[in-house]
Image (cartoon, helix red, strand yellow):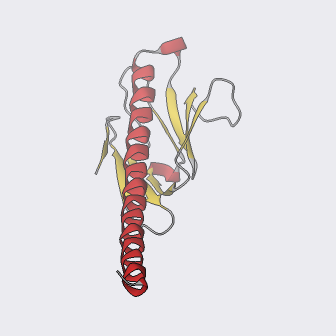
Amino acid sequence: MTLAEIVVVIAVIFILLGMTVAAFDKLGAIRALDTDSQTVVLELEKAHSLTLASKNEKQYGLHFASSSVTLFEGASYIAGSGSSTVTYLNPSVIITGLSLAGSSTEIVFDRLTGKTSQPGTITATLSGKVSSTKTIRVYATGVAEIQ
């Protein structure tokens, strides 16, 4: 083999390596969006379940920020409350859209029925090179699903 042939083989290997890394990067970002969307649904289900169980004789809800969701106790969110639990999203995932009844940033479930007066949608989006979104719909019955 000549030096020119070796250089060509090495160049081809680097091109293939670059394509592989880009594909895995995109796959990882999409996986983060899927995982965080499921996390939001699970947190909604947790708040719903805690409310129906009347834990501490309270109702529960979820507050949405661009990079986190906060499970809180009571009829409304109070920032910094000791009874709240914050779940941070992957840095590449942000909540870009909240379309909840009453232009709210939180969903609170009613004791006994588990219903909410803030039904609507939550949109999670990948930030960066890969463009993808997931929409989570919350129904007035308190049921949440990824669309």
Q: Residue at position x 36%, y 77% from top? A: 9
Query: In front here: 24 or 125?
Result: 24
Instruction: Find residue 61 and report its horizontal and vertical position in percent.
Output: 50, 32
Please tell me which residue lies in front, 55 or 91. 91
- Spot occupied by residue 124 in the image (x, y as percentages of width and height): 44, 55
Say which residue appears at 38% left-offset and 82% top-offset: 8
142 and 91: which is toward the camera: 91
Residue sitting farthest toward the front: 1
Considering every residue shown, the one lying at the far top of the view is: 56
Q: Quadrant of residue 7?
A: bottom left
Q: Quadrant of residue 16?
A: bottom left
The residue that appears at 38% across and 84% down in the rendered structure is 2
Query: Is 76 placed above or below 7 here?
Result: above
Whether 124 is drawn above or below 69: the answer is: below
Q: Residue furthest left?
A: 147
Residue 5 against residue 111 in the figure, above or below? below
Whole-percent x, y for residue 19 in the image: 37, 70
What residue occupies the far bottom of the structure in this picture?
A: 4
Relative image position of residue 126 (x, y in whole percent): 46, 60
Q: How many marks?
A: 0
The image shows residue 134, relative to residue 16, as above or below, that is: above
Q: State the quadrant of the N terminus.
A: bottom left
Q: Is residue 18 visible?
A: yes
Q: Is residue 131 visible?
A: no
- Quadrant of residue 39 in the image? top left
